[in-house]
Every structure is written in structure tokens, then in C-alpha cells.
């Protein structure tokens, strides 16, 4: 039994960890949304306490009526009742309005917590499977069941509300236990014995505790199913939305992927379907526990009715008080149950908060240096890789091995090599997306880790092979920001070969790129997108410009245009140019040849050909395509 219990409880965090995690995350959320939590608390405290004002005044009015009261006093009480009811409703409506204006922010705030963190993660972490898996678990749990930060807020509200109502319930039910059955009532006087009071309270407490415990056990199945549910959400997110994804529309038709796409929704045994594992939890233990939880909670009402009715039968109070006592005690028990449930929910939710906590705790390891660099427009930057080796996190093999290379000061360096030879990795290290595993990279003789990270990145304009353009206005895309200098953006687009196309756009630089955001936007071809990406790198006007396969998606004419204007494009900056097409590297005086992660050769086109080694091998393999160029 103990083995089994241990296995089941493993899904929930220990209480100590649950409590510290919950408090820490609540404090964090309160720091982000103080106004919302204040209004939410005020609204709920007000809502929980004010009903007792009405009950109290009504009781006074009934007492006055029963005692044949004076009209004056009765009128005053009625007016107080009406005015207080009006004030209570008005304040309640005001607080609700204030709460609602802030609460619509809750999900956005949660998203912005995750996006802010993802945007500032070290590239190596952002690129890691662990961070991606964490983020997808967090978003999926939040979207599918509100687990995580929204559930934390729900539990808090529930506890505040229930705790306030609890006081009201206690105040209204104290007299039930204090009023004795009159002596002449025969056997029913036995109810005056404190044993009965203790017995009733014990029964109530037992039921009150058992019900939420069963409920929490039922919902703990969701914590247990977290990885199944996340996988299901991911599959659903992929297959469920394939039919709406424009980029798959051709493949779906040409390769007849319809059956494959529909298999996820038609197969009843998949995760979210009626014969899937999640449904079996719902039909089996989780469903049974939920039902038991509800049934047990109804039992408590039965005990209360029996006790109150018997006391009334014995003459302890009039029939009129029966309803008041039954509702007061039921309310009391309901509130204790509600608090217990909220605590149970906090326990289940801690598993989800742990993912958020892990994501938020990723450390920034790149921003360690504080030295300043030469001004942006300085051109005398020199880079040196000294004995640099690099392994991707978790990889066994080196992607770069003992690379020694020096370049800069307006030089044009071409980097060539077969696929997987380490060219892009070389660029990623140069731009400090990763730090070397061994060796050091120097800028003007200083280790680049000593420089301010953001300042260092400012020095690079890079067009990566797998670049992406955001769905913004063309001018904003080029400037990578909301504001842009029209003249400069136009010049960069023209230099990058997009000038003629720009003239055809009705809204010019104000045209939206792609139609996803604005239907009047334009879809651009791969080649056009590449030109825009090149224009972005020019607009940034950094001393280093890195082009990773910049012409792969361009047609031969456009490619020729880019080469012709290359001098103008790089304008005395230090440029690094990666290409598979060796013919396109000839114009760079300096060519570095990578092979198996090592810098194999370096020199001009003619020098490298005369070596008759790696470069010559690559050149000869491609030579047939260049004939006539
Ligand atoms: P190239 O740009 O010359 O095609 P890369 O620099 O992209 O080569 O890759 C060099 C080596 O590093 C290859 O063996 C590749 O599989 C590996 N590699 C590239 N990116 C990653 C990554 N994110 N994680 C692990 N290994 C990688």
C-alpha cells in the first residue's frame, strides 16, 4: 500500500514546497498586477460581508413587528434597510466595474510574463528543448484549464470570499447551540448535552473535510495526466490547425495528406477522444471520486436538518428559526469546504506553478561584461578567434574545433564549406549567441565577454539563412522598430534590389508585409523577403555585416544585381559572407574554408585553387554549373 501511495502522491508536490512556491508566485503576481488584486479583494470582501447587513436589519424589523412596534421606529428601520441596500449595491457595482477593467488584463499579463522572459533568455536557453517544453506546458495548461497563475488567483479569491462568509455563518449559528430545549420536553432534552453539540460539529467537520479531499484527489489526476495532456494539446495544435495553415495547403493536396490530418480527430483512442487515456481517467477513478465528493457534501445537510428540526420540536426555538439555522450551519460547512477545496486546488496547482518558476529562474549568463565599445560608426574593429572549440548544449560532438582566425577593419571574408562544416556556428559564436566551450574570441584584443552584451550585439547586422520577417509595415520591418526614417528605409530597400517592387506598393513603406495582420498587406516571395531582410541589415548600419546564404532564394539576375552592388552594400564595413555557391564568393578577396568544424584553408580564390585541396574539391564539384558565367 505504501509503495502505491508513494507513487500516487509523487504527482503532487510536498506541502512545504507547495506553500513556499504559492506565496512566492503570488507575491510576484501581486507585484505585476497590484491594482487588480486590490480591487478583486475589496469586491469579494464587500460581497461576502454585506449580505449580513440585510439579514441583521431584517431581523430587527421582524422583532419590531412581532413586538407591535411604533410606526416611527419601523419607518426609520425600513428607510435604513432601503438606503443601506442601495449603498451596498452601488459600491458593489463600482467595485465590480473597477475589478473587471483590471481583470481582463490577467491572461495578457500572464502571457507577458512568459514572453518577456523568453525574449530575454540567453539564446542557448531559448534554443534549448527544455525551455521550449516548459513554455509549451505552461501555455497549454493555462489555455486548457487555467492552471498556473490564473488558478492561483481563483484560489486566492475563493479563500478570501469563504473566509469572510465564514464569520457571518459563525455569528448566525452560535445561538443554535446556545439555546437549550426546555426542561419539560422529555427525551429531547438530551439534545442539551454538550455531547450532541460536539458530535454534530465532529460529523460536520468530518464530512466537510472528506468531500474536498475526495475532490482534490479527483483533480490530482489532472496533475498526473499533465504530460499526456500537454502532448495531446501539442498534437491537437498541430493536426487540428493544419487545414487552416496556408503554407500546408499545397502539400495536403499534392501528397493527399487529408487522411493523415484527419486521423487525429477520427481515431477515438487518441488523447482527447472518448476512448483515450484522459477519458478513461474521467470515467474511472477521477469521475468516481468527484461523484463521491458531491454525495458526501449533501450528507452534511441531512445531519444539520435532523439536529435543528429535533431542537425545534423540543421547543428550543420557533419553526421560523429552522430555516435560518439550517442555512447558517450549511453555509458555515459550505465555506469550510470551499476553503478546503481552494487549498486542495492550490496543492494541485503547485505542480503547474513549478514549471513557471523554473522558466522564470533561468539565469542571464551573457550580460556579465560592462566594458564599453568604440562608437558605432568606428570602422577599425578587429576580431580574432583564438583556439575556439564549441559543442552545442547536450551534444557529444564538437561543431567547431580549434578555430584560429583573425579578420576585420573593413575586410570582406567569405566562409565556405560543405553542409554541417560549422559555418553558421562560427557566425553564432561571432555574434555571441553562444559562448565558446574552449578558447576565446577577441575584439580589438579584448575577450568579447568583457563587453556590455547589448552594446556588442549592436555592432552586428546579420541576415540568417532562416530569417523571419514580422508582420508589420514595410518601413517598420526594415527599421526593426515602430518608428523609421523614410529616406534611409527607401535607400536600403533600393540597395537590396527591392526598389522597383517598392514603387508598385500602393501604400509604399506603410504597406503591411503579409496578410495575416492586415488584409490589405502584401505577400512577398522568398526572394523578395530575402531582399527585405538584407535591407534590414543595411538599415541597422553596424560596423559588421554578416550575410548567411544571402542569395539562396534569389533568381540568377537578382543575385547578379546583389553582387554588383555588394561594394556599395557593405560600404567599407567588415563583412562576413557565407555561401554554398563558390562562384558567388570569388569577389571576396579572403576566403575561409571550413571542414568538419575546423578552419581547413584560407586565402584568395586563386591561392586556394592552387592548393588543390578542400576548396579546389568543392570548386571542381560545382564548376560544371558555372561554365559560361
Ligand atoms: P553549416 O552552417 O556549415 O551547414 P552548422 O554550423 O549549422 O553547419 O552545423 C555544424 C554542426 O553543428 C553540424 O554537425 C550540426 O548538425 C550541428 N548543429 C548545428 N546546430 C545545432 C544545434 N542547435 N544543436 C546541436 N547541434 C547543432
Image: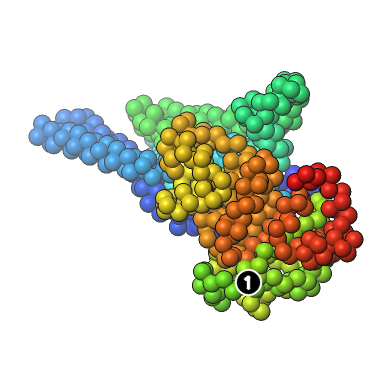
Residue at horizontal 51 percent and vertical 34 percent from the top? 522
Q: Is residue 139 left or right of residue 603?
A: left
Residue at horizontal 80 percent and vertical 66 percent from the top? 602
Residue extending farthest to the front is 628
Q: Where is residue 70 in the image (x, y as percent from the top left)?
A: 11, 33
Q: Which element is circle 1 on?
A: loop
Q: Is residue 21 left or right of residue 61?
A: right
Residue 435 visible (yes or no): yes
Residue extending farthest to the bottom is 445
Residue 397 visible (yes or no): no
Which residue, given by chain and number where applicable, does mark 1 sit on? 409
The front one of 64 and 74 is: 74
Residue 266 picture quarter? top right
Q: In this view, does 432 lie to the left or right of 436?
A: left
Q: Quadrant location of the N terminus?
A: top right
The front one of 365 and 185 is: 365
Amino acid at each position: 500500500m505504501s509503495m502505491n501511495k508513494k507513487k500516487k502522491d509523487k504527482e503532487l508536490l510536498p506541502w512545504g514546497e507547495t506553500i513556499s512556491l504559492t506565496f512566492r508566485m503570488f507575491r510576484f503576481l501581486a507585484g505585476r498586477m497590484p491594482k487588480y488584486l486590490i480591487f478583486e479583494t475589496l469586491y469579494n470582501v464587500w460581497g461576502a460581508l454585506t449580505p449580513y447587513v440585510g439579514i441583521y436589519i431584517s431581523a430587527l424589523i421582524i422583532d419590531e413587528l412581532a413586538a407591535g412596534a411604533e410606526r416611527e421606529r419601523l419607518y426609520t428601520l425600513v428607510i435604513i434597510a432601503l438606503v443601506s441596500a442601495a449603498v451596498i449595491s452601488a459600491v458593489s457595482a463600482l467595485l465590480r466595474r473597477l475589478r473587471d477593467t483590471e481583470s481582463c488584463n490577467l491572461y495578457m499579463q500572464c502571457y507577458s510574463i512568459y514572453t518577456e522572459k523568453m525574449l530575454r533568455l540567453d539564446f542557448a536557453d531559448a534554443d534549448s528543448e527544455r525551455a521550449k517544453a516548459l513554455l509549451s506546458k505552461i501555455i497549454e495548461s493555462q489555455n486548457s484549464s487555467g492552471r498556473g497563475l490564473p488558478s492561483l488567483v481563483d484560489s486566492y479569491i475563493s479563500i478570501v470570499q469563504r473566509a469572510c462568509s465564514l464569520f457571518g455563518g459563525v455569528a448566525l449559528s452560535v445561538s443554535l447551540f446556545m439555546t437549550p430545549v426546555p426542561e419539560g420536553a422529555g427525551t429531547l432534552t438530551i439534545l442539551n448535552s454538550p455531547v450532541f453539540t460536539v458530535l454534530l460539529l465532529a460529523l460536520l467537520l468530518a464530512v466537510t473535510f472528506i468531500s474536498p479531499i475526495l475532490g482534490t484527489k479527483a483533480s490530482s489526476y489532472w496533475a498526473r495526466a499533465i504530460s499526456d495532456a500537454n502532448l495531446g494539446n501539442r498534437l491537437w495544435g498541430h493536426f487540428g490547425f493544419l487545414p487552416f495553415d496556408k503554407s500546408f495547403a499545397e502539400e495536403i493536396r499534392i501528397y493527399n495528406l487529408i487522411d493523415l490530418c484527419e486521423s487525429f480527430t477520427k481515431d477515438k483512442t487518441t488523447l482527447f477522444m472518448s476512448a483515450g487515456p484522459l477519458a478513461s481517467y474521467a470515467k474511472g477513478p477521477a469521475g468516481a471520486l468527484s461523484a463521491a465528493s458531491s454525495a458526501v457534501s449533501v450528507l452534511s445537510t441531512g445531519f444539520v436538518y435532523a439536529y435543528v428540526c429535533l431542537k425545534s420540536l423540543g421547543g428550543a426555538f420557533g419553526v421560523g428559526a429552522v430555516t435560518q439555522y439550517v442555512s447558517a450551519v450549511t453555509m458555515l460547512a459550505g465555506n469550510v469546504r470551499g476553503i478546503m477545496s481552494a487549498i486542495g486546488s492550490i496543492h494541485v496547482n503547485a505542480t503547474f506553478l513549478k514549471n513557471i518558476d523554473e522558466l522564470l529562474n533561468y539565469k542571464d549568463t551573457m550580460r556579465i561584461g560592462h566594458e564599453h565599445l568604440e562608437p558605432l560608426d568606428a570602422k577599425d574593429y578587429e576580431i580574432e578567434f583564438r583556439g575556439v572549440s564549441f559543442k552545442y548544449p547536450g551534444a557529444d560532438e564538437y561543431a567547431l574545433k580549434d578555430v584560429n582566425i583573425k579578420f576585420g577593419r573593413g575586410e570582406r571574408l567569405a566562409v565556405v564549406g560543405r553542409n554541417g562544416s560549422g559555418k553558421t556556428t562560427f557566425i553564432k559564436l561571432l555574434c555571441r549567441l553562444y559562448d565558446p566551450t574552449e578558447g576565446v574570441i577577441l575584439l580589438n584584443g579584448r575577450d568579447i565577454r568583457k563587453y556590455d552584451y547589448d552594446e556588442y550585439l549592436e555592432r552586428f547586422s546579420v541576415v540568417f539563412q532562416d530569417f523571419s520577417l514580422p508582420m508589420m509595415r514595410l518601413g517598420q520591418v526594415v527599421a526593426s522598430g515602430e518608428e523609421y526614417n523614410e529616406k534611409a528605409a527607401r535607400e536600403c530597400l533600393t540597395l537590396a534590389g527591392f526598389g522597383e517592387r517598392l514603387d508598385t506598393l500602393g501604400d509604399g513603406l506603410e504597406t503591411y508585409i503579409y496578410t495575416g495582420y492586415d488584409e490589405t498587406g502584401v505577400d512577398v516571395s522568398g526572394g523578395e523577403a530575402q531582399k527585405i531582410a538584407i535591407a534590414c541589415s543595411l538599415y541597422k548600419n553596424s560596423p559588421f555585416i554578416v550575410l548567411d546564404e544571402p542569395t539562396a532564394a534569389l533568381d540568377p539576375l537578382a543575385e547578379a544585381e546583389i553582387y554588383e552592388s555588394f561594394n556599395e552594400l557593405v560600404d567599407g564595413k567588415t563583412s562576413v559572407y557565407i555561401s554554398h555557391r563558390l562562384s558567388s564568393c570569388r569577389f571576396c578577396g579572403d576566403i575561409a574554408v571550413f571542414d568538419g568544424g575546423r578552419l581547413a584553408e584560407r586565402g584568395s580564390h586563386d591561392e586556394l585553387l592552387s592548393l588543390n585541396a578542400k576548396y579546389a574539391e568543392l570548386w571542381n564539384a560545382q564548376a560544371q554549373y558555372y561554365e559560361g558565367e
